[in-house]
Image (spheres, rainbow, N blue to C red):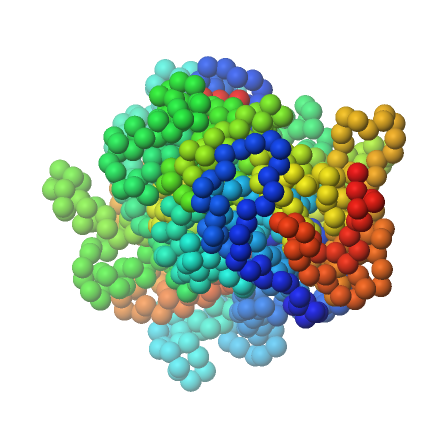
Amino acid sequence: MSDATEQIAVPPPRDRAHERAPASREVHSSAASAPLLEVRDLRVRFHQADRCIAAVDGLSYPLCAGKTLAIIGESGSGKTVSCRALMGLLPQTASVTGSVLLEGMPLLALKESEWRRQRGRKIAMVFQDAARSLNPTMRVGQQITEAIRQHQGVDAAKARARAIDLLDLLRVPDPQQRFLAYPHELSGGMRQRVMIAIAVSGNPQVLISDEATRSLDAITQAETLKLLQDLQRQFGMALIMTSHDLKLASHIADDVLVMYAGRAVERVPRGHLFSRARMRYTRALLDASPHIERPPHTPFPVVPGQPPDLAALPPGCAFEPRCASARELCKLSRPPLEEHERGHWWACWHPCQDSELV
Amino acid sequence: MAIDSTAETLKLATLPAPSRPRRHPLRWACSADIAVPLAMLSIILAGLLLPALYAMPEPVGGNILDADQPLLSPGHLLGTDANGNDILSRLLHGGRTSLLIAITVNLFGLLAGGSLGAMSAYLGGVADTIIMRVLDVLIAFPSLILVLAIARALEPGALDTIWALTFFSVPAFARIARAATLRLREQPFMVAAGLSGTGTWRVLARHIAPNIFPQLATFGLLGIGIAINIEGAVSFLGLGIPLPQPSWGNMIYQGQMTLSARPSLVLLPGMLLFVTVLSFNLLSEALRARWARQ
Amino acid sequence: MRTPISLLQSFGHSRRAAGLRPSPGLRLAAHRGLVAIPVLFGVTLLTFFVLDLLPGSAARQLLGADATPEQVAALEVRLGLNRPARERYLHWLTGAVTGDLGKSIASNQPVTALVAERLPVTVELVALAFALSLALSVPAALFAAHRPNRLVDRLTMLLSMGGLSMPSYVLAPVLVLIFSVNLTLFPSIGFKPPSAGVLENLHSLVLPTVAIALPLLCFYTRFLRGDVVEQMNGEDYVVTAVAKGIGPWRVLVRHALRNSLFGLLTLVGLNFGALIGGTVIVERIFALPGLGQLLLQAINTRDAPIVQAIVLLLAVVTVLANLCVDLLYAALDPRIRYGDR
């Protein structure tokens, strides 16, 4: 597709123990030698009648056990599509290239019958809108036990007990009653917990949360995130969460990956996100998000223009048309995602200088 | 098993598209699902016009001495029936009658019923409720019975069959037009038109009509098939087009009595009817799929 | 042809949006029941006046073509046919409400008895046809929906379209030709009541049942396949189900089909009433002593009481069928049962 200069650097397998942010967290002893999940040069293309949409255009990242990666991007940045690719949930019309290794096993080459063994058991997903993502005519308990019996092959009574335990773990009040409820009888937060219960029922190693808190109010959002964190610790999972909200991501992520137009443009450890984000787009995102210290009635620094047409990506940097600091080179050549500082990768020909950082 | 994450594709589809080269307007007709039924219908229609161009024996008034000629007899391609009438000629004339009735009924239904339904939905209020109740009654009515009753009472013939069938075609179109208009009313551009003070008639003509037309048209095609079937049924029961004037329905009725001896008397009109209705159905279906995609 | 269903459903939605009440489904059903009464009233009124306005007279039919006008008039007085229309209708209505549907003009027998005699045959026929078509359409639709737009699917849809396009008076003779004349498997005419043996009874009904069931089967298959495919493609809960790692058949049956059955239910309900009236042709062809034959005779002889009684019956059946569908919806669809929040 973009036959322009392919200069994506494949991250060499190396020690990922980078500096930690002041807010302390448990550090897993297995500060990974080899990552649990490794995505290399993932490309997803949708072929329509007369054009080809590059939804994901060369995405690479590692993910270690017990760690949390937040993928941030606008709508259309490719974050959801890339997550679906990890689950094998893309339609037949999508062509997926690159490699995704889960514990060394390549996922993309799997046949549908083999995928079924992976889904839910090794890698699971929590979806966004629980109201639509749950079968409205099936009791939630049955939807959870269906997942449990699929993964663990136990009988109905045991599955039911486990499901209720899970609901209890997820701090659902009165789990026995809730077990028998239908999705529309539950509140948004409860429904989301059911989704999470379904996802973790198979004890997956990687849990993907695809904007799982988007439809929730602020307080419920915070609660749900905390739950995810606790679960992660308890089950020892690696967590990928996608969002368009940087603030949210920074709360629980170890690393933040920013995507734009199907490409990863910056990968930064949590502690550096606000203070040391280099790529222009990340900067723009940060500047555009409202925060309390902003003096009132000052104009919002909105990024001009529109995201690019994914069917006709420019040869150079995808953000170039909207970037205030763009130069000739940015138009001609796509900047590679490279590790410029320890644990901090970015793809920009003219990143923010130290003097520009807040 | 394919999962089509429509949400994703939809999201992608809303991104700004590059300008596409203009397609030839009739290219849509070239795809198989439309072309095949269209071709079949063209053949049938061409065949039905044959008597006008090519001298054929009359469908009625045949010589009794000529009766029961088998297929491929000299002068009678498909043979003759028990009264000596040429079957091919009867098939073609009968088809013309059936098709004319069906098309007239649906055209009238589309225009009258469509307008009624659209107006009813657009105006709303008491008028709408009353019209809806009346339509409910008509639709709750076992249609065939009323058609039969009317057909029995009146002088049997084409005109009265049309009248009887329209009785049910109009409410059906009205229902569809009403539902479509209601859905349309919620759209932003309709609200805008209302706010800008556009007159009722103008709104109906300019905005509503072109938008509900595709649905009405696809139903119309389906309705032609239905009308052909019902007309055939009525004629089959002896209440529609009176013998000796041919119609596919009454030809089948005639042939019933000698089914085992001469099956072709039933099969020929039957198959012709089947193929015609099938073509209309296929066409309607293809157009519906086409328009739904837009 | 989903307009009736979506109309019904949107009706239900607006009802629910109006507010939470205990068992809103039952309220809906009750409301529809109440609305049905004026509809029934309207139907009978319409029938009466149409029959009345149409030219021709029952009395003349009875006496034959060469009766003198005096004889006809005398008979009309005797039968009470000369009274004003309004009076006659009210007379009939009061009778009908109390269960007395009058007497047949032609045979002077009580209408209720005549109808009751013919009804079981028609009902049995329709019931068998429904059972057959539903039993076959569900697996057919699932097989087609399993791999949408592939060979099995396209073939099934094409065949269904063919089956839909063939009216009963074309299909029945074809069936008779193949199975009766050539293969002599089934009788071409005649009906054996259950009292003559259940197998005998069913044997005599095979061809008529197939003649009615085939178009129904095709219709349901098309509808169900469309609905299931729509669910599988467009609904998020299907993605969740697949993400659990469960197999395609299970997703199809346990999730998509479950939700599609509601639509099918509505369709069946809508069809039921229409079908009881629509057996006329099949009964005629196969010489079954059912309601349709009776109706045809009554129309031919201008026997108004019978026609009215049958029309009323059909209208009642239609209304009841719709009501049953609503009740079933209320019982099965949890969204309606407990109300949306």
* Residue C221 pos. (x, y %): 40, 50
User: In the rendered image, which quarter is residue C102 located in?
Assistant: top left
Q: Is residue A315 above or below residue B226?
A: below
* Residue C274 pos. (x, y %): 42, 39
Q: Is residue B205 left or right of residue C341?
A: right
Q: Residue at (75%, 59%) from the top-left corner?
A: A317
Q: Residue at (53%, 33%) from the top-left corner?
A: A25
Most extreme residue toward the bottom, as rendered?
A: B74
Q: Residue at (77%, 58%) from the top-left corner?
A: A349
Nearest the viewer among B242 and C287 is C287
Most extreme residue toward the right, as rendered?
A: A298
Q: Is residue C260 above or below residue B280?
A: above
* Residue C53 pos. (x, y %): 54, 33
Q: Is residue B271 left or right of residue C196?
A: right
Q: Is residue C63 above or below residue B27?
A: above
- Tell how many labels: 0
Q: Is residue A59 visible in this depiction of the protein?
A: yes
Quarter occupied by the C terminus of chain A: top right
Q: Is residue A348 left or right of residue A93?
A: right
Q: Is residue C274 visible in this depiction of the protein?
A: no
Nearest the viewer among B117 and A174 is A174
* Residue C275 pos. (x, y %): 38, 41
Q: Residue at (58%, 35%) from the top-left corner?
A: A252
Nearest the viewer among B8 and B46 is B8
Nearest the viewer among B283 and C9 is C9
Quarter occupied by the N terminus of chain A: bottom right
Q: Is residue B85 left or right of residue C117?
A: right
